[in-house]
Amino acid sequence: MPIIEMENRQVVVIGAGPSGAIAAALLKRQGHDVLVIERQHFPRFSIGESLLAHCLDFVEEAGMLDAVNAAGFQVKTGAAFAWGERYSAFDFGDTFSHGKPTTFQVQRADFDKLLADQAALQGVEIRYGETIVSVDVEWPKPQLGVRREDGSEYRIEADFMLDASGYGRVLPRLLDLEAPSNFPVRQAVFTHVEDCIDSPTFDRSKILVTTHPTKRDVWFWTIPFSNGRCSVGVVAAAEHFDGRTDNLDDCLRGFIAETPSLSGVLNNAVWDTPARTIGGYSANVKTLHGPGFALLGNAAEFLDPVFSSGVTIAMRSASMAAAVLHRQLQGEAVDWQKEFAEPLKRGVDTFRCYVEGWYAGTFQDVIYHEGSSAEIRRMISSILAGYAWDERNPFVSEAKRRLKVISEFCAKDAT
């Protein structure tokens, strides 16, 4: 029987994406031994390209902000929404939370590699092209089985594991932690184009979220990059794809053709990249932590792409987990449920409230309402900027009640 190599490490982070890079850098800055295992090689494609302002708080905390600022990404000042003739824009420089006034729109292949490289420059060891094939949390310490690209395998015994594997959901799969999401199954079809946008009303510093003229639960993203290209995608429930072509490029362009305000913006676009699709992406888990492990970002839960909350939740979870783990590794008694899972969930549930309201139409009524007060718009802008944990904001601390009241007012006022 072959002898399997055994390695002992303090912290193993699964995945080198944004949450993994941030968590690894934060722990390394505290003096801990950190190893990152990444299945792919960077750069690699990923969606989630429109960052929220709150993301940069964690980039700064991890000592990476100067590098990100210098990278030449498209500056993002807020979010714009369009539905027929209606248009509503929110600026991150005018929010209740007074957070960072701008952020970036990024091609994730470049952005994720930059963060991972910054973590490596801080001393984090990252092993690319290696796959976690088994995990055992019944030992005194967790043990991971790792397979290299040449097929050889080895094991790692770690004091603690952080799963930042995103859609790979390594520990949820291997430890049977996956739970069904209560969100309907939706599908996204998307591509990158040379946009050639010449519309004087189009603001390249904002993501454009467009509602379908007649199907309010169908929406589009248009995310401009700094190189004259943009990401374009449609999100719809499965039934809206019935009867449409299986050709993804034609399917996406068909949806856009039904939406004059968006087709006008993209009238000169060069469709030079084959479209991709992802479906059934909403996910949940039975627990966010367990003996010797915690789950970060999309590895734990993914809601929906509509408000670009995924990377924010991922980075927030990385920062929170690193702080708790640092104390644990120093010998302090910690409570992962009360100090990590519950406070993280409060912000996630705030996003969930507004995602559900978007598809129900109630939050759209608020977004597109022309008579909202400046203070209400600032509170909403805070959430759109990612500050879903700021419980001083009534639209965070009382999200469901506030949305119900204001949406009923907006719907009544519209009639």
Image (cartoon, helix red, strand yellow):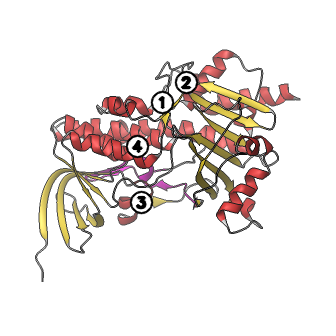
Give the CA separation, mark 1 to mark 3.
27 Å
Contact, mark 4 vs mark 3 (Cβ under 8 Å) = no
Q: Out of 46 and 19, give the one closest to the viewer.
A: 46
Q: Out of 340 and 25, give the one closest to the viewer.
A: 25
Mark 2: give few (<14), some (14-19) or many (20+) Cα within 10 Å: many
Residue under numbered circle 2:
92
Residue under numbered circle 4:
111
Q: What stretch is highlighted in magenta?
A: 277-301
Residue 211 vs 283, above or below: the answer is above
Direction bottom: furthest residue: 1
Q: Which residue is drawn at 37% across and 44% down?
A: 19
Which quadrant does the C terminus fall into? top right
Among the two numbered marks 1 and 3 on one chain, the one whose residue lies closer to the N terminus: 1
Q: Identify the image quadrant of residue 306.
A: top right
Residue 279 seen from this side = no
Residue under numbered circle 1:
103
Task: Give x and y (percent) for residue 316.
Answer: 40, 37
Judge depth for marks 4 and 3 and give the one in front. Answer: 4
Task: Give x and y (percent) for residue 111.
Answer: 40, 43
Residue under numbered circle 3:
168
Among the two numbered marks 2 and 1 on one chain, the one whose residue lies closer to the N terminus: 2
Q: For the residue marked with disc 3, what is the amino acid?
A: Gly
Among the two numbered marks 2 and 3 on one chain, the one whose residue lies closer to the N terminus: 2
Left or right: residue 149 versus residue 266 is left
Give the CA separation, mark 1 to mark 4.
13 Å
